[in-house]
Image (tube, rainbow, N blue to C red):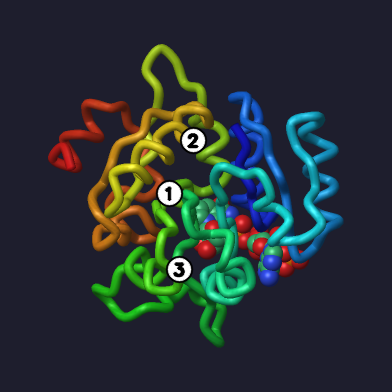
Amino acid sequence: MTTAIIGTGGIGSAIARQLASGGETLRLSSADQASARRLAAQIGDAAVVAAGNRDALQGADAVILALRFTALKGVIDEIAGPLAGRLVVVPSNPVGLDAHGNLVRLLPDGQSSGEVVAGWLPAGARLAMAFGSMSADLFESAGHRSPEPAVLFYATDDDRAGQEVGRLIRTAGFEPVKAGGLGQSGRLEVGGDLHDLVVGPAKARSLTGGA
Ligand SMILES: NC(=O)c1ccc[n+]([C@@H]2O[C@H](COP(=O)([O-])OP(=O)(O)OC[C@H]3O[C@@H](n4cnc5c(N)ncnc54)[C@H](OP(=O)(O)O)[C@@H]3O)[C@@H](O)[C@H]2O)c1
């Protein structure tokens, strides 16, 4: 199947490599198209560079918005029409740097990034928050682990999105486990109790209570 990845920086590149290694076809787009071209050349035949963000969605079953949180709304507005009826996967953590270079959360305590992003999407888009629960290096080293796969947590309010993102997570070499609905997405992000956790399915289910 085909997935569009918009944003080919640190996490977008890692997700692209992991998905391609599992047999997914990719359509890549980034503000810096040179970075998308370099990544496509590294991946080979499984990846093509789209002419732009909207073009990336042509023929794609799903789209991953591998963007900084502050860039998300602008890109969603740019590609809103084609998002309806598609799985939209968001790995973004709602964090940025303050004037002193310290990492700060961009949303008030207790406000879920998943619910905020859901409010930006058009009706009919199926949102899953996923692929942002590990740093890029850890994500790449934990994929395709054997004999027991590592878990990648996701959060969604939509059962079909859960099935679809589960397929992508397996393609990337992990076992999917739902952490909860979009209101629980804070558990996946930097500072959340499930962030940067490499565990197997049994431990993951004990942490999520079989959500
Ligand atoms: N890196 C990690 O280890 C990691 C792990 C988990 C989660 N995350 C989260 O994932 C998000 C992205 O992080 P990152 O480290 O990958 O950031 P990044 O390296 O800055 O990559 C962001 C990418 O988005 C592109 N972009 C910006 N505006 C765009 C637009 N309008 N249209 C298309 N592409 C655009 C950037 O292109 P330009 O370079 O040309 O601006 C860049 O390729 C963040 O929220 C972060 O918290 C990151």
| Image position of 161 (left or right of 71) | left
User: Is 208 in front, or is 181?
Assistant: 181
How crowded is the residue under tag 1: few (<14 C-alpha within 10 Å), some, or many (20+)? many
How crowded is the residue under tag 2: few (<14 C-alpha within 10 Å), some, or many (20+)? many
**Nearest-to-viewer mark from 1 and 2:** 2
Q: Which residue is mark 2?
A: 168
User: Is 41 in front, or is 117?
Assistant: 117
**Nearest-to-viewer mark from 3 and 1:** 3
Residue 69, above or below 163: below
| Mark 3 or 2, nearer chain start | 3
| Mark 3 or 1, nearer chain start | 3
Return the mark for residue 121: 3
| Image position of 110 (left or right of 46) | left
Residue 99, above or below 204: below
Return the mark for residue 35: none
Q: Which residue is mark 1?
A: 130
